[in-house]
């Protein structure tokens, strides 16, 4: 069965420090990988995706993610966190023959303190 | 903002009732997907419509049904509501069936009492 795991319910970082939000996946074949962010009472906003090619992908708002095929991971990173980055982050995966069906992790609450 | 709109914003229904949620896709998008997000969980795929035809369905019972109209707007219908149907319902639009990026609306918060 296809699944996505975000092992941390919450991540706390100080403003200006680097942040990492972890994601591992279990999907057959070579999946497409995504990160979305959700602010309170808002829908999901697309941050970045990995389709193929360079394992380090860059996205919106200074975020980047590293695809590691051997570890089946796709961790979200940012060199310097901002208080405004505080939100709920979701990792998602889509199989290459799954049409538009996204499988989401359970989410990680990121809290950035001044 | 993504250009995807949903109505209503909030809704309270009683167990056993039926509900219709609406989604207006971003201009030029012909694919819409619906997701259910229970409190504290990630969204779960309900189904997808492409050019008015259902072309993918998640693990949801038949009482969850949908429609996509010629202008690519969409409805999600849920019959015989159960307490566990209380959730945020998200729609997402995209160009084509297998496009990489889906654009989500703000969601409809459904509460079943």
Image (spheres, coloured by chain):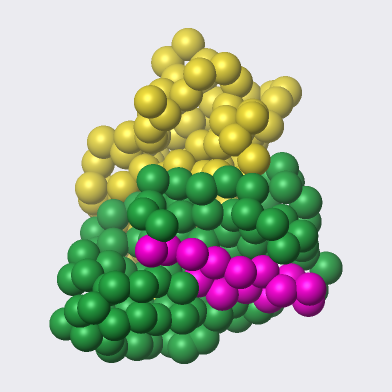
Quadrant, the C terminus of chain B: bottom left
Observer-nearest of A42 and B55: B55
Residue drawn 64% across the image and 48% down it: B55
Where's residue B47, x and y in %?
52, 54
The picture's colour for chain B is green
Quadrant, the N terminus of chain B: bottom right
Tell me if residue A1 comes above or below residue B59 in the rendering: above
Q: Left or right of A60: which side holds A80?
A: left
Magenta-highlighted residues: B63-76
Residue A16 lies in quadrant: bottom left
- Which residue in the rendered view is the most extreme toward the top? A70
Observer-nearest of A58 and B75: B75
Residue drawn 51% across the image and 37% down it: A93
Camera sees residue B20: yes
Where's residue B37, x and y in %?
35, 61
Q: Is residue B78 magenta?
A: no
Residue drawn 55% across the image and 80% down it: B22
Residue drawn 57% across the image and 17% down it: A29
The picture's colour for chain A is yellow
Where's residue B73, x and y in %?
68, 75
Q: Is residue B66 magenta?
A: yes
Q: Left or right of A10: which side holds B37?
A: right
Picture mark count = 0
Residue B10 lies in quadrant: bottom left
Observer-nearest of A66 and A94: A94
Tell me if residue A84 comes above or below residue A2 in the rendering: below
- Which residue in the rendered view is the most extreme toward the right? B28
Camera sees residue B104: no
Where's residue A65, x and y in %?
54, 36
């Amino acid at each position: 069965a296809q699944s996505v795991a975000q092992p941390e319910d919450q991540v706390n970082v100080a403003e200006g420090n680097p942040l990492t939000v972890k994601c591992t996946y279990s999907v057959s074949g070579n999946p497409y990988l995504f990160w979305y962010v959700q602010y309170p009472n808002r829908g999901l906003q697309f941050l970045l995706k990995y389709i193929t090619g360079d394992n380090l992908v860059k996205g919106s708002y200074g975020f980047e993610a590293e695809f590691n095929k051997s570890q089946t991971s796709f961790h979200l990173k940012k060199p310097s966190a901002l208080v405004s980055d505080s939100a709920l982050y979701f990792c998602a995966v889509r199989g290459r023959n799954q049409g538009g069906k996204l499988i989401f992790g359970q989410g990680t609450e990121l809290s950035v303190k001044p | 903002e993504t250009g995807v709109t949903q109505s209503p914003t909030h809704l309270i229904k009683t167990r056993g009732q039926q509900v219709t949620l609406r989604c207006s896709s971003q201009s030029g998008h012909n694919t819409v997907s619906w997701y259910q997000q229970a409190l504290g969980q990630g969204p779960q795929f309900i189904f997808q419509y492409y050019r008015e035809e259902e072309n993918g369905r998640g693990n949801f019972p038949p009482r969850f049904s949908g429609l996509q109209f010629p202008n690519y707007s969409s409805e999600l219908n849920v019959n015989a509501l159960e307490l566990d149907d209380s959730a945020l319902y998200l729609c997402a639009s995209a160009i084509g069936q297998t496009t990489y990026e889906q654009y989500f609306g703000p969601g409809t918060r459904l509460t079943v009492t």
